Image (spheres, rainbow, N blue to C red):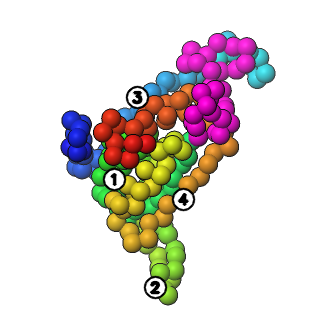
Amino acid sequence: MWPGSDLAVTWPYSLFMAKMASDDLAPNPGYQEQPAASEEQPSKGEAGPGRPGGSAGRGAHTLVNAHDTGGSGAPTDLVVLMSTFPNLEDLGEIAATLVGENLCACVNILRETLSIYRWNDEIVTNKEVLCLIKTSRARQAALVARLTELHPYEVPELITLTPSAVSESYLRWVNEMTQALPDDPAGI
């Protein structure tokens, strides 16, 4: 439970680890399979689903400049934080916390990577887990502060990437998912 909240998140480590170790991960609940290519589909350049002049069953996937305000005057910037962790267990717990506290919309956990770096005057080679954390610019400072607090590394890798364009529907979803909780002490 978070202070002043009735929201509780239980992170099932065994389920998380079993899913990460298997290849039978469930598809994203927002996933909609595209129809197979056929002669009836429009050819390149013609109007059709997802193309100008066509009807897209899921709505048009318009790209917007990532720095637009969406007409509201409020910032809707999308930022992506990149970070590495020593293992899946640490990252899984922290990812669930960050999403649960509405500090980010999504954490993509990439499988193990090899990192080579200098630490304490030695060249070190370690296996790490890389993640991409999607949030709004309005929640970035609170996300970085919380991630720094939770991160197991003495010097965590926190790199912010700003995309040049984002699909309008994805940007809207990120902004909805990162609205501050009612009892957010940061008030952001």
Bin the neighbour count of mark 3 within 10 Å (Cα to Cα): few under 14, some 14-19, many 20 and up: few
Bin the neighbour count of mark 1 within 10 Å (Cα to Cα): few under 14, some 14-19, many 20 and up: many
Q: Is residue 70 magenta?
A: yes
Spatial distance from mark 4 to mark 2, Cα to Cα?
21 Å
Element at label 4: strand
Task: Tell me the number on the disc at residue 159.
Answer: 4
Amino acid type, label 1: Ile
Question: Which residue extends farthest right?
Answer: 45
How many numbered circles are shown? 4
Question: Disc 1 designates what residue?
Answer: 94
Q: Earlier in the sequence, mark 1 or mark 2?
A: 1
Which one is in front in this view, the residue at disc 4 or the one at disc 3?
4
Which one is in front in this view, the residue at disc 3 or the one at disc 1?
1
Task: Tell me the number on the disc at residue 132.
Answer: none
Bin the neighbour count of mark 2 within 10 Å (Cα to Cα): few under 14, some 14-19, many 20 and up: few
Spatial distance from mark 1 to mark 2, Cα to Cα?
26 Å
Part of the protein shown in magenta? 50-77
Spatial distance from mark 2 to mark 3, Cα to Cα?
45 Å
Q: Earlier in the sequence, mark 4 or mark 3?
A: 3
- Give the image location of residue 15, x and y in percent: 25, 45
Amino acid type, label 3: Pro
Question: Disc 3 designates what residue?
Answer: 29
Question: Disc 2 designates what residue?
Answer: 120
